[in-house]
Image (cartoon, rainbow, N blue to C red):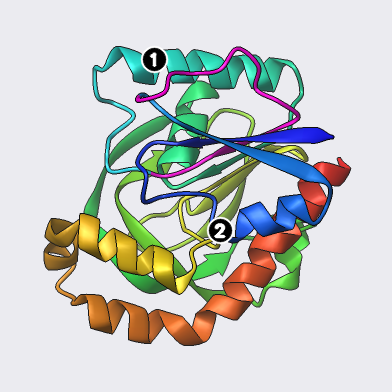
Amino acid sequence: MKVALCLQHVLFEGPGVFRLALETRGYTVKNVVVPAEGLPADPGDFLLIMGGPMSVNDSDAWIEAELQFVKTALANDIPVLGICFGAQLLAKALGGSVTPGPKFELGMSSVSLTDMGKIDPILSAMPQDFLVFQWHGEGITLPPGSTHLVTSADFPVQAFRMTDRTYGLLFHPELEESDMGALCRECPQDVQRGGMTPESIQARSRPHLPGLHQLADRFIDHLIRK
């Protein structure tokens, strides 16, 4: 059975609905919490890099080690999907950069497909403008040679593709309502910075979760076929 390695950075940001999407397609999902559990020797058959409250620009040795781990997976042509901090880490591994954004972006916000996003094999199924769930304060500068897929006013790079097997998403399509509750409990300072309450975050997000989960499923379906 193929193994999908999920790199978590905190216990409260796991694979969400990506787990079911992978398991129903015959993958075993192996969760590893970095840096607490250390990096495994093998990136598996699919690499999923999740979010976290840290910055890829922090000087911690484990971040550099994870960057090298991601570069190895890319060199081995393993499908890689980075989410939020994971997308920032992926962008940096590919030669892009990560810088503070104009604000802390939290909750549902509108994003738009770029011209290349409109013809992307996954994102072309989305409308021109759609709502996604956000939880971040830093943005991405596109890696050289990558394709810009989704944009917004405050954070221009919301999604990018390096190859048909490598995508980075600044937003979260995978979160379930319970995951949002955990984020609110564990990061109350972020909720305050965003000028929201846990109740308002969940109430505004709830109607949009089924569509986001369908998008998450499409990403997995595409990546495991390439």
Q: Check disc 2 and report the residue beneath it.
A: 150
Circle 2: residue type: Val
> Along the horizontal axis of the image, is 90 left or right of 183?
right
> Along the horizontal axis of the image, is 15 left or right of 223?
left
Gap in angstroms between the C-alphas marked 2 and 1: 27 Å
Which of marks 1 and 2 precedes in the sequence? 1
Circle 1: residue type: Glu
> Along the horizontal axis of the image, is 31 left or right of 162?
left
Vertical relation: 125 (above or below) 43: below
| The image quarter in which residue 154 lies | bottom left
Q: Nearer the viewer, residue 124 or 179?
A: 179
Name the spot of residue 116 as percent of width and height, x first: 69, 55
Q: Check disc 1 and report the residue beneath it.
A: 64
Name the spot of residue 152 as percent of width and height, x first: 43, 63
State the predominant SS element of the stretch in magenta: loop
Q: Secondary structure at mark 2?
A: strand
Q: Nearer the viewer, residue 60 or 103?
A: 60
| The image quarter in which residue 73 lies | top right
> Along the horizontal axis of the image, is 7 left or right of 193?
right
> Number of marks in the image?
2
Q: Are marks 2 and 1 in contact (CB under 8 Å)?
A: no
Residue depicted at 11% across the width and 66% down the height: 192
Q: Quadrant of the image for the N terminus? A: top right
User: Which of the two marks, 2 or 1, is nearer to us in this view?
Assistant: 1
Q: Secondary structure at mark 1?
A: helix
Residue depicted at 39% across the width and 73% down the height: 109
Name the spot of residue 142 as percent of width and height, x first: 50, 37
Q: Which residues are magenta?
A: 36-51
Labelled disc at residue 175? none
Q: Is residue 46 magenta?
A: yes
Structural crowding at the residue carrying mark 1, measured as other residues with C-alpha within 10 Å and reported as few (<14), some (14–19) or many (≥20): some
